[in-house]
Amino acid sequence: MKKLIVLDRDGVINEDRDDYVRSLEQWQPIQGSISAIARLSRAGWIVCVATNQSGVGRGYFSADELMAMHQKLRDLVHAESGQISEIVWCPHTPDEACSCRKPQPGLLDKISALHGSLAGCPMVGDTLRDLQAGQSHGMTPLLVLTGKGRTTRDKLLSEDQLTGIQVFDDLAAVSEYLLNLNN
């Protein structure tokens, strides 16, 4: 397996909000997520982030504010001697019918153009659309129970659609699992 991982952002790396994470002050990492990213990076993993950010398209926050949030994320990971290779994002609202808003494959197409095939690589998300985007590239879906993950798991369980999807408590548990796979 290529050592490349794609992470959703809100609900996986940072706390999610129903009214959108709109500012640098509201962007708060989930406990253990920064260390998890740094550990993967130090172990030779290429860490990428693919995130829907329709709050930009809705006018809730600017692209500059989003870039400040992403810089904070990069700085926190760098402070733990890790790095994030790419952060790709979609500013569109659901009604714009773009090709980049997950579950569409456009964000992952961008990562694939830079790093080659994503087949078999882990896609970590807290919603079905994250996992579906990954599956469009033959990625391995990993569901975390942070963010909207518990609701997603319960819905998939009730519809008997959880087959083939590994479930983890959080990104730290995903990191531990992947690092132990390679030992």
Image (cartoon, rainbow, N blue to C red):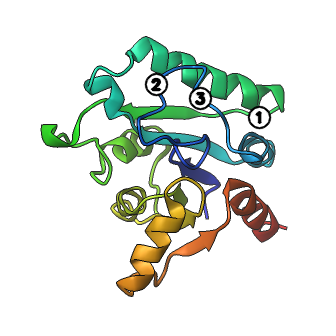
Give the residue pinned by disc 2. 22
Q: Amino acid at mark 1?
A: Gly
Q: Amino acid at mark 3?
A: Trp
Residue 3 coordinates in the image, percent (x, y):
65, 55
Residue 104 horizontal side relative to residue 33, left or right: left
Residue 163 horizontal side relative to residue 102, left or right: right
* Residue at far top of view: 64
Q: Is residue 127 visible?
A: yes
Instruction: Give the mark, 1 or 3, whose residue is nearer the N terminus.
Output: 3
Q: Is there a contact, CB below 8 Å, between mark 3 and mark 2?
A: no
Instruction: Give the mark, 1 or 2, whose residue is nearer the N terminus.
Output: 2
* Residue at far bottom of view: 160
Nearest to the observer: residue 125 or residue 27: 27
Look at the image and tell me in which quarter the N terminus lies. Answer: bottom right
Residues at marks 1 and 2, CA–CA distance in whole angstroms:
25 Å
Q: Quadrant location of residue 47?
A: top right
Q: Quadrant location of residue 84?
A: top right
**Disc 3, SS:** loop
Residue positioned 67% across, 59% down in the render: 170
Q: Bin the neighbour count of mark 3 within 10 Å (Cα to Cα): few under 14, some 14-19, many 20 and up.
A: many
Instruction: Give the mark, 3 or 2, whose residue is nearer the N terminus.
Output: 2
Residue 99 coordinates in the image, percent (x, y):
21, 43
Give the residue pinned by disc 3. 27
Residue positioned 26% across, 26% down in the render: 58
Residues at marks 3 and 2, CA–CA distance in whole angstroms:
8 Å
Q: Which label sits on residue 82? A: 1
Image depth: mark 1 or mark 2 in front: 2
Q: Bin the neighbour count of mark 1 within 10 Å (Cα to Cα): few under 14, some 14-19, many 20 and up.
A: many
Residue 28 coordinates in the image, percent (x, y):
65, 33
Q: Is residue 183 above or below residue 123?
A: below
Image depth: mark 1 or mark 3 in front: 3
Q: Amino acid at mark 2?
A: Arg
